[in-house]
Amino acid sequence: MVTWNLGEIKLWIVPMLDPLFRKNQNGFRRGQSTTAQIPFIRRMLEERKKFNKSVAICFVNFRKAFDSSSRNILFEVLALSGIPPRIVEAIRVLYANTNVTVISPD
């Protein structure tokens, strides 16, 4: 029986997936944080206001987003991204019969 832990799997897939991310994506990247986007959003809003331009911003309700996301599609995307089948299967096993709760200060 082969055992995997999430840290080992992460060491395998991060170098494979990192080049696929956009440079401005901060979430799910080492040394980056989604809060790094706040100054960018503020500057963008100030610039748009300065030139009297409209702007649209979309915020995601993560509870609903993750409640409805298909893990099977996640596994397909990982496989299509070049992640070896044994790693995809290890991730599939980790996600089997799990529940997640997001705790927010709100």
Image (spheres, rainbow, N blue to C red):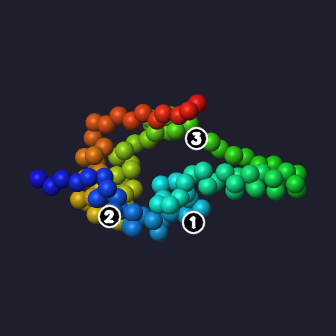
Rendered view: 90 above or below 95: below
Crowding near the residue tagged with mark 3, few <14, some 14–19, many ≥20 C-alpha atoms within 10 Å: few
Number of the front mark, 3 or 2 = 2
Q: Which mark is residue 12?
A: 2
Query: Looking at the image, do the residues carrying marks 3 and 2 touch, with CB atoms under 8 Å apart?
Result: no
Q: CA distance from mark 3 to mark 2?
A: 29 Å
Q: What residue would you read off at disc 1? A: 23
Crowding near the residue tagged with mark 1, few <14, some 14–19, many ≥20 C-alpha atoms within 10 Å: few
Query: Looking at the image, do the residues carrying marks 1 and 2 touch, with CB atoms under 8 Å apart?
Result: no
Choose between 55 and 50: the one closer to the eye: 50
In the displayed orientation, state which residue is furthest to the left: 1
The amino acid on which the numbered mark 1 sits, given as a three-letter code, is: Lys
What residue is drawn where x is 48% and y is 33%? 103
Q: What residue would you read off at disc 3? A: 60
What residue is drawn where x is 46% and y is 35%? 102
In the displayed orientation, state which residue is furthest to the top: 106
Q: Specify which label sits upstream in the sequence, 3 or 2.
A: 2
- Horizontal placement of 34 versus 103: left or right? right
Q: Which mark is residue 54?
A: none
- Horizontal placement of 98 versus 106: left or right? left
Quadrant holding the C terminus: top right
Q: CA distance from mark 1 to mark 2?
A: 20 Å
Rendered view: 63 above or below 31: above
Q: Specify which label sits upstream in the sequence, 3 or 1.
A: 1
